């Protein structure tokens, strides 16, 4: 078995007081595959997202408020408040002569480590102003379909690229035709995730990256052309929901656009523009959920880009409104009839500004990686993380119940809370494990909405605040002087490092709950940073793609330990450094 003896690192988990050793990940996956190929249980692809006994863990001081070894639902009830996130209905009413309108009310919050303040708001207009957000009107659906078609035309999509023929392209992309069967869109060629275990070419390429038989500049590797570089990457692993392995469907989708050349959507843009990036993950659920997540991956960059380019200069509030409109229009035009939906968690970078929009229980994060200029010691800290939109959250539950829906809260906190709705394909009552999503029109009848929470951060401000905090902390500590016993004179400390711009790096990642349910956010950030900022001369350096692979296998091992091979969720991750040249 290839590289079974390789132990690159281990990620500490609270689960069963064990460590999931990354060096053993292949053995566990092979075991899982064998179990899947021999089981005779029926496929469960049509069920809404499961999670009744998932475990959720947090182990560092940054996430100290999350209790180790609590149940998945328990984690939500005792949420990891140490990571700042947008929450609540932060919308006020403004009345003119004709009607009430929603005005985003900004929330100010800060991370607990460095005190960096960010701006956020909830784009949902509020219960009082809700005119049926969860269920698009016929007029909105028609307008949204028209807007999406226009955006795809402007982005250069041909019939093959927008049809149903290319469902697997996000899983097994072809470099020259990454998004479909035609040329790349005008906004650029996205990196798309390949399966780390069930795609033989990908598995071989990752092994070669580990052995360093190929490099980042090696054109022989299709993986380096399709799924990532040293500074941006995305990978996936298909899950297992019962039945034959060959019948499984990966409903997770993801992409990274670095650069995101949205200015080219309407016309060829010759001006020198600020750096732009776009990445995200989209976790499909329910029967045909993969069709919705695939649709979102194909349409979101074009629709978002076409709205961004419509005006030369945009304020942060205007970009926030564009993000909301994009989510709502994609929801209204998605192939969610008769069934299906997906999460959406995206990160948009325009110059030094970072815009994060989230609907559902996938999540996106912004983190900093710090290198001590003297000792070269490295640390990684989370600055921001989106919340998980769960129906038991106070404002979410109020909305669902105001719309006539019911929130299921499992007794004793064992399981995850759900919005109950009638499944259109079976007529039975189903439970959706989130309060916001794209698609899920039947759940929209009872208060599940597509409107995202939005946060706005700034790279320069993050670096400035972190550097200020680091230098001030060291200087304060240096004031504690020692006394020279021979002379009685004070000896000031002289080992203070002076941190500068190059000592603090800013990066982002998005992940579906198949990864987040078993790997703590801080562990993901730390391991991603090893891939992004490795010392190329060091013997144990790792590539960003293999760092993502490590995390996926560690999560898969968690599923294997917890479920005994009976169930594993799909897993997807997207990562990008936010300061390198795209």
Image (spheres, grey):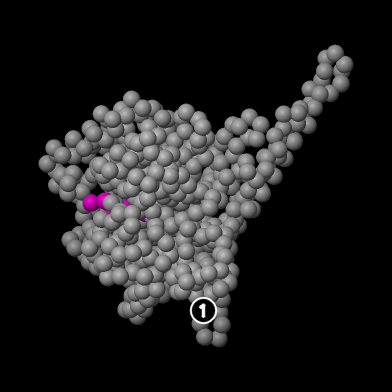
Q: Is residue 129 above or below residue 393?
A: below
| Residues rendered magenta in the picture | 249-254
Residue 277 in view: yes
Q: Position of residue 522 (x, y in %)?
A: 49, 40
In the image, is 162 to the left or to the right of 458? left
Q: At numbered mark 1, what does the secondary structure look like: helix, strand or loop? A: strand
Q: Was residue 567 drawn as part of the magenta stretch in this picture? A: no
Residue matched to label 1: 100
Residue 436: quarter of image: bottom left
Q: Position of residue 214 (x, y in %)?
A: 38, 38
Query: Residue at image x 30%, y 43%?
Result: 202
Q: Residue furthest left?
A: 40
Query: Residue at image x 82%, y 20%?
Result: 483
Q: Is residue 172 above or below residue 66?
A: below
Query: Residue at image x 17%, y 46%?
Result: 246
Q: Position of residue 335 (x, y in %)?
A: 27, 67
């Amino acid at each position: 078995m290839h590289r079974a003896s390789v132990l690159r690192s281990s990620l500490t988990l609270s689960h069963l007081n064990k460590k999931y050793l990354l060096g053993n990940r292949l053995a566990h996956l092979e075991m899982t595959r064998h179990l899947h190929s021999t089981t005779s249980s029926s496929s469960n692809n049509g069920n809404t997202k499961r999670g009744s006994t998932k475990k959720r863990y947090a182990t560092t001081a940054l996430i100290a408020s999350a209790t180790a070894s609590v149940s998945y639902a328990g984690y939500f009830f005792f949420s990891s408040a140490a990571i700042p996130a947008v929450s609540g209905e932060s919308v006020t009413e403004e009345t003119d002569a004709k009607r009430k309108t929603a005005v985003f009310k900004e929330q100010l919050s800060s991370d607990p480590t460095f005190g960096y303040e960010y701006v956020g708001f909830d784009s949902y207009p509020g219960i009082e102003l809700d005119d049926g957000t969860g269920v698009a009107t016929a007029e909105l659906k028609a307008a949204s379909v028209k807007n999406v078609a226009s955006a795809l035309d402007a982005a250069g999509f041909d019939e093959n690229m927008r049809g149903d023929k290319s469902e697997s392209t996000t899983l097994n992309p072809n470099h020259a035709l990454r998004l479909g069967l035609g040329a790349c869109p005008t906004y650029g060629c996205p990196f798309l995730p390949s399966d780390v275990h069930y795609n033989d070419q990908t598995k071989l390429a990752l092994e070669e990256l580990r052995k360093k038989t190929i490099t980042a500049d090696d054109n022989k590797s299709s993986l380096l052309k399709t799924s990532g570089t040293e500074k941006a990457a995305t990978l996936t692993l298909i899950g297992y929901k019962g039945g034959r392995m060959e019948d499984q469907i990966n409903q997770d989708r993801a992409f990274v656009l670095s650069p995101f050349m949205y200015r080219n959507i309407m016309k060829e843009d010759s001006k020198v523009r600020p750096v732009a990036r776009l990445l995200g993950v989209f976790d499909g659920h329910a029967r045909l959920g993969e069709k919705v997540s695939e649709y979102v991956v194909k349409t979101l960059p074009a629709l978002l880009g076409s709205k961004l380019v419509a005006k030369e200069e945009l304020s942060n509030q205007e970009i926030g409104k564009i993000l909301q409109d994009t989510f709502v229009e994609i929801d209204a035009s998605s192939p969610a009839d008769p069934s299906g939906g997906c999460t959406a968690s995206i990160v948009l970078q325009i110059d030094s500004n970072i815009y994060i929009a989230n609907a559902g229980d996938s999540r996106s994060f912004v983190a900093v990686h710090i290198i001590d200029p003297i000792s070269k010691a490295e640390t990684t800290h989370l600055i921001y993380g989106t919340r998980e939109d769960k129906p038991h959250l106070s404002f979410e539950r109020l909305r669902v119940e105001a719309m006539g829906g019911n929130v299921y809260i499992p007794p004793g906190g064992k399981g995850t809370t759900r919005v109950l709705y009638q499944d259109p394909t079976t007529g039975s009552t189903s439970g959706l494990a989130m309060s916001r999503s794209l698609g899920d029109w039947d759940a929209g009848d009872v208060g599940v909405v597509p409107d995202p929470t939005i946060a706005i951060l700034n790279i320069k401000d993050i670096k400035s605040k972190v550097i200020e905090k680091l230098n001030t902390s060291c200087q304060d500590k240096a004031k504690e002087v020692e006394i020279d016993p021979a002379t009685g004179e004070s000896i000031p400390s002289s080992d203070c490092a002076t941190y500068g711009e190059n000592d603090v790096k800013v990066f982002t990642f998005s992940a579906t709950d198949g990864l987040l349910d078993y790997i703590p956010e801080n562990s993901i950030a730390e391991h991603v940073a090893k891939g992004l900022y490795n010392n190329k001369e060091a013997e144990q350096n790792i590539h960003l793609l293999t760092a993502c692979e490590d995390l996926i296998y560690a999560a898969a091992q968690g599923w294997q330990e917890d479920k005994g091979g009976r169930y594993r969720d799909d897993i997807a991750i997207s990562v990008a450094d936010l300061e390198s040249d795209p």
